[in-house]
Amino acid sequence: MCKICGGITCNEHGQRDPAVPEFVCVLCDIAPLNHSAGGGGDGGQPSSSSRFASWEQFLERQPSYPQDWLAEGLYQWTNEPGLLIEYVGPDPAAQKLLAAAAALGSLLEIPPEHLPQRVALMLGFGPQLLL
């Protein structure tokens, strides 16, 4: 059962983080990335132990995602520095973590109601869809 949303998923749609004794589903991988980028409670309240210090730490702790797939999504978002600065300020590590959250949301085609609010807004979903 997912620690964040309580959903029950198979091993293909969720994984146990080896650094933290909790299971997190693919829908909720975005919340800790957003939280790690300074998202506070936006989109869930992951435990402090499930926060990531960097994009590289996320890849290390969540190895089941195809690396090239994630790198391509991340590259697309890091080419939008103005948008990232608007949401997280000038910190490059926070920008990369938020870019990773947006890339996952986009690549996994997660509906806006299952995304942290600022990630949904970055992906172009208007506030009316988030109510």
Image: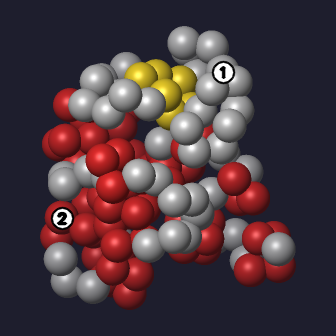
Compared with residue 59, is residue 129 higher up or lower down, i.e. above or below? below
Q: Amino acid at mark 1?
A: Thr
Q: Amino acid at mark 2?
A: Ala
Quadrant (top left/top right/bottom left/bottom right) for the C terminus: bottom right
Q: Position of residue 101 (x, y in %)?
A: 43, 54
Residue named by callout 2: 93
- Report the label total: 2
**Residue, x 42% and y 23% (percent of image)?**
16
* Label 2 CA crowd tier, 10 Å (few <14, some 14–19, many 20+): some
Check disc 2 and report its element: helix, strand or loop. Answer: helix
**Residue, x 69% and y 53% (percent of image)?**
114
Left or right of residue 90, residue 123 in this image: right
Q: Position of residue 82 (x, y in %)?
A: 33, 83
Q: Position of residue 29 (x, y in %)?
A: 48, 42
**Residue, x 27% and y 68% (percent of image)?**
95
Name the quadrant containing residue 109: top right
Residue 123 visible from this viewpoint: no
Name the quadrant containing residue 22: top left
Compared with residue 61, is residue 94 higher up or lower down, i.e. above or below? below
State the CA–CA distance, disc 2 to disc 1: 30 Å
Q: In this view of the protein, which residue sits in the foreground, 128 or 28?
A: 28
Quadrant (top left/top right/bottom left/bottom right) for the N terminus: top right
Q: Position of residue 17 (x, y in %)?
A: 35, 28
Residue named by callout 1: 9
Labels 2 and 1: the sequence-earlier one: 1
Q: In this view of the protein, which residue sits in the foreground, 77 or 115?
A: 115
